[in-house]
Image: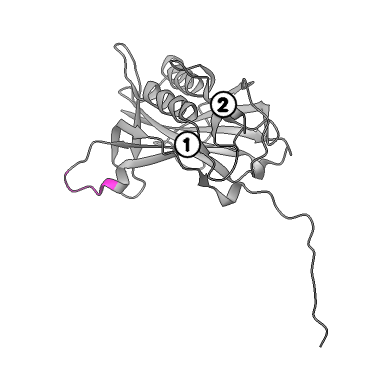
Amino acid sequence: MALIRAVHTFQSNTGVPADAVVNVTHWTTPDASPGGVVLQEIITKIRKFYDEPTENAPNVCTMLSTTALSSLGARIQLYNLANPKPRSPLVTDLRQAPGFGPSLYPNEVALVLSYSSTPAPGVLQRRRRGRLYLGPLSSQPSLVAGATGDNRPSALAMRTLKQAGERMATKAIGDLVEWVTLSTIDAVTGKVVKGFVDNSYDTQRRRGTRATNRDTFAIPA
């Protein structure tokens, strides 16, 4: 069996690598040395997660900010965790991501898909969980519930992300790969079997823009 790490990257409009937005998923396959067919299946599942509409909902990419991210800078890189470090990607998939929307939100604001695998004896459940952070976010009206006051993700935004996660976790007949959680502490994996999206935004401070100016004051003695 092989354990594959998939790194999903959206390049920032600044062009600075440190400003890119990154999510990570892990996948297992019975093949110890997976070839092109297996790797392409992983890429296809991740592409569908972001790019393809879900049932009665838009695609996940519509919730990403065109003012913060470049749709031309999307890529997926796959790594076999059995290979020694520093690892080279088995494959790099470059693409143009569809449908970003305008945004007035700070770059730190994100919507989160939380997921987990089945509890296992002797394994702390927190090691069998994972999260995907969607952001910086578009502020399209259809994706935001409430124009003033207590702004929250709309039911449409929550359903879009939930259904995309459910689709990616579903293993159909004939599939060669499986989305899993990975505990980096004890190297235990588990098939993703459930997840949720809260109607509350998350703040990813590392995605915030750096200060370019400072206003100061000093009180005379």
Please report the bounds of the magenta region as a residue range.
Answer: 121-125
In x, y percent, where is residue 201? Answer: 50, 43
Closer to the camera in the image, 106 or 24: 106
Q: Give the mark nearest the N terminus, 1 or 2.
A: 1
Closer to the camera in the image, 145 or 6: 145
Q: Residue furthest top?
A: 174
Q: Residue 142 carries which label?
A: 2
The amino acid beneath tag 2 is Ser
Q: Is residue 179 magenta?
A: no
171 on left or right of 66: left
Contact flag, marks 1 and 2 (Cβ < 8 Å): no
In x, y percent, where is residue 181? Answer: 34, 37
Residue designated by label 1: 24
The amino acid beneath tag 1 is Val
Secondary structure, magenta segment, majority class: loop
Residue at 70% x, 52% y is 210
